[in-house]
Amino acid sequence: MTWRKKRLGILLGITLGGGFFDVNADIIVRELGRENGEPEPYVVPYAFASEAMGFVLGVGGGISGLPQEQNSFIATALVSDEDAAAVYAYFNDYQLSGIPRLFLDASVGLGDFPQQRAYLDSSPPGEDPPAGSNDSSSTNYLDAAGYSNWIELDFKYVLDIGHARYTPINIYTLSNGLLVGGASGGSVFNPFKSGRSYIQASLFHHDRDYDDLDTSTRLRTTGFGFSFRYDNTDFQINPSTGSTIKLGVRHDPGYYDDESWTIGEFEFSHYFKLPGNENSEQRVIAVNAWTAHTFSDEPPPHYFGVTLGGLYRLRAYPIERFHDTSAIYYSAEYRVIPKSDLLRKLTFLDFVNLQWWEIATFVEVGRVAPEWDFDELHDSMKSDIGLSLRIMANNDIGRLDLVWAEDDAAAWLMYGHPF
């Protein structure tokens, strides 16, 4: 396997702008021996060099437990010597007064970049295959200066069934970052007896700009989404058993004199806890399947539609490397938390409350297609393999993924498990 092209993709913070499929809802995490509800602020400076942005300086940070114990606020800001600048912020799990089962998330991103990549046709129109398609050339893209801005509001309603029957907020108890009490599912696959179920409504506005790009290319969208999620895992942040099902739709009714578009998505994840041994504190096999389809004749902007590549799916490829009408994707991970007090002995890092470290190996396969056809979607699929280092600090997970494919490779620094 050859590392033909080096890329380093780094995003400090959290899942910013992922929409209704990427949230942990209405939960409180307490560590044995720590004061309940104690706010936990942190600040982390960082720096890196990027071909697209030059030398970057930034700072990320956040605080949990204010104004409500289950709330968290995370933000990051960066500047570069190539005039890149960006700010991202996310606030989650605010319990609305008078409706105790309704929670609000809010997120915003503002960025101006000297070089943004888009897998849109840079060759003459009509040449096949089109940019971003499964068989497209990896060199068929454009790089241009521009901005990327968005804002999203997500309203989550917790159904009073299963483990949420008696309380809309689940409290997990951890010891050294591992679950010892408050499991929220995984016993039986039945939303009325186990797990937590959600109905979610989202409002979004996304807008991008590429200098010198044909103005007929759609780059702005405003709309809403609806979804149902059944989370039957034991611990939402770091599942070791159980499963999740997510089903949703996104729709732009056609603001700004554009045609309307509609996308449907389905995702399933399952977690198998393996017996412990003398070398590990926890071993888990995690599997994931996802598919999406565009139901309208008019597609959404390429970056907000059905895509593969980047931080979560087909991670060896650039963000939004593949996009089309439909897609399918599968992944499997083997996650191991070694028996080691290495992080806990680093007393100079006590302020970030390091709890454990984990090694994960994974494999991914997937492809996009101009229509949802089972045979076509499983033919000539793209694939990659990877190695991931993950840590848990302040009850949240950070990960560094190193991923290789036949014709590409990547490194990603990100917040949270990919699924």
Image (tube, rainbow, N blue to C red):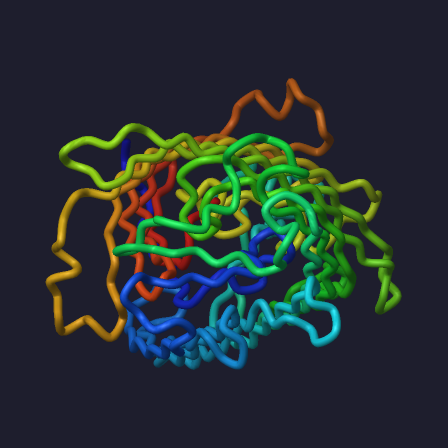
Rendered position, 42 above or below 21: below
Rendered position, 165 above or below 291: below
Q: Is residue 226 left or right of residue 33?
A: right
Rendered position, 416 above or below 272: below
Q: Is residue 29 left or right of residue 47?
A: right
Q: In this view, does 259 lie to the left or right of 343?
A: right
Residue that protrudes farthest toward the front in the picture: 166
Could you tell me if residue 128 is visible in this image?
A: no
Figure quadrant of the N terminus: top left
Residues 134 and 127: in front is 134
Picture coordinates of residue 302, whole percent (x, y):
66, 52
Picture coordinates of residue 124, whole percent (x, y):
65, 47
Picture coordinates of residue 239, whole percent (x, y):
43, 43
Residue positioned 80% across, 48% down in the render: 262
Residue positioned 65% across, 50% down in the render: 165
Residue that protrudes farthest toward the top in the picture: 375
Residues 60 and 385: in front is 60
Could you tell me if residue 244 is visible in this image?
A: yes
Q: Quadrant of residue 204?
A: bottom right
Residue positioned 57% across, 58% down in the render: 25
Picture coordinates of residue 376, whole percent (x, y):
64, 22
Residues 137 and 249: in front is 249
Q: In this view, does 50 lie to the left or right of 235?
A: left
Residues 412 and 163: in front is 163
